[in-house]
Image (tube, grey):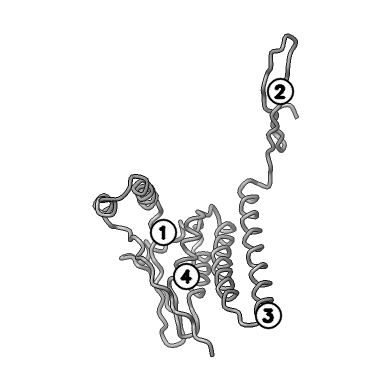
């Protein structure tokens, strides 16, 4: 039976609660100006990002227990409900359980996988439950896509290659469709096309303007 591959060692991600000014002084010392500009931009976005509690998983017998890195369980739940764009506790309970199960493999747990999906949801900033569900699926589909990409790089036969390619293409197309679905849902399915026109009056004076075609509600039609 194949074992789950170990995660690569990566640089530690910055944690909430750190002194950004102190950290910036340390990491920017002696670096090139352009590199420091990029570091400061990331630090600014990091400070502005929503501070959602980290999910912690534990196997207790046959049950998967879920907790959060927060000193108040109720406050953690409310913060996560805000991340999910919901005020319904039943939706939160179901959605958080589904995200937690992504990081569960029998007796093994991978809280990073669950926290990754939650970070995708937080980054998309859903406005309602439908957007939240779509964001959860997008995080899960991306994770599965990268798993298939790794598998494709390690095939040992043509049948394995064909199977991995088909699955990878399906997942990549699904993610693109999800992106398009989210965009159309947020814009109400309406598209606006701007056509620039140039009118030349007698005497050679040109007037440049925009013709805007959209849905109902535009002036004139």
Q: Which residue is mark 1?
A: 79
The residues tagged by marks 4 and 3 sit, at their Cα atoms, a distance apart of 33 Å
Tell me, for residue 186, which label it has, or none: none
Q: Is residue 149 visible?
A: yes
Furthest residue to the top? 203
119 or 186, which is in the foreground? 119
Q: Secondary structure at mark 4?
A: helix
Q: Which mark is residue 198?
A: 2
Which residue occupies the foreground of this view, 70 or 49? 49
Discs 1/2, front: 2
**Is residue 192 toward the left or the right of residue 42 in the image?**
right
Residue ID at (65%, 55%): 181
Report how far apart the C-alphas of labels 4 and 1 lie in the structure.
16 Å
Query: Which numbered mark, 4 or 3, is in the foreground of this view?
Result: 3
Looking at this view, name the residue that lies furthest to the bottom.
1
Across and down, in percent, residue 156 comes to: 61, 82
Sooner in the amino-acid sequence: mark 4 or mark 3:
4
Is disc 1 in contact with disc 3, using a CB cutoff of under 8 Å? no
Q: Residue at left 34%, top 60%?
A: 14
- Observer-side mark, 1 or 3, equals 3
Residue, disc 4: 114
Q: Who comes first in sequence, dot 1 or dot 2? A: 1
**Disc with the residue nearer the chain's start (2 vs 3):** 3
Residue denoted by label 3: 158
Instruction: Name the quadrant of the C terminus.
Output: top right
- Vertical position of residue 215 compared to residue 21: above or below: above
The local crowd at label 1, few if under 14, some if 14 to 19, many if 20 or more residues have their Cα within 10 Å, is some
């Amino acid at each position: 039976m194949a074992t789950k591959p170990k995660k690569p060692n990566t640089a530690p991600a910055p944690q909430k609660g750190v002194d950004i000014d102190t950290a910036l002084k340390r990491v920017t010392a002696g670096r090139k100006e352009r590199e420091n500009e990029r570091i400061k931009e990331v630090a600014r976005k990091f400070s502005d990002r929503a501070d959602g509690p980290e999910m912690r998983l534990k196997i207790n017998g046959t049950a998967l227990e879920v907790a959060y890195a927060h000193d108040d369980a109720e406050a953690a739940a409310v913060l996560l409900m805000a991340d999910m764009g919901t005020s319904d506790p039943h939706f939160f309970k179901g959605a958080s359980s589904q995200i937690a199960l992504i990081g569960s493999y029998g007796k093994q747990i991978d809280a990073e996988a669950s926290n990754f999906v939650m970070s995708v949801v937080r980054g998309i900033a859903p406005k309602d439950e439908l957007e939240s569900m779509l964001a959860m699926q997008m995080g899960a589909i991306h994770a599965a896509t990268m798993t298939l990409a790794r598998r494709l790089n390690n095939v040992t036969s043509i049948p394995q290659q064909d199977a991995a390619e088909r699955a990878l293409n399906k997942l990549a197309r699904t993610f693109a469709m999800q992106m398009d679905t989210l965009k159309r849902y947020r814009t109400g399915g309406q598209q606006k096309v701007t056509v620039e026109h140039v009118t030349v009056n007698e005497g050679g004076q040109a007037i440049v303007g925009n013709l805007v075609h959209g849905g109902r509600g535009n002036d004139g039609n």
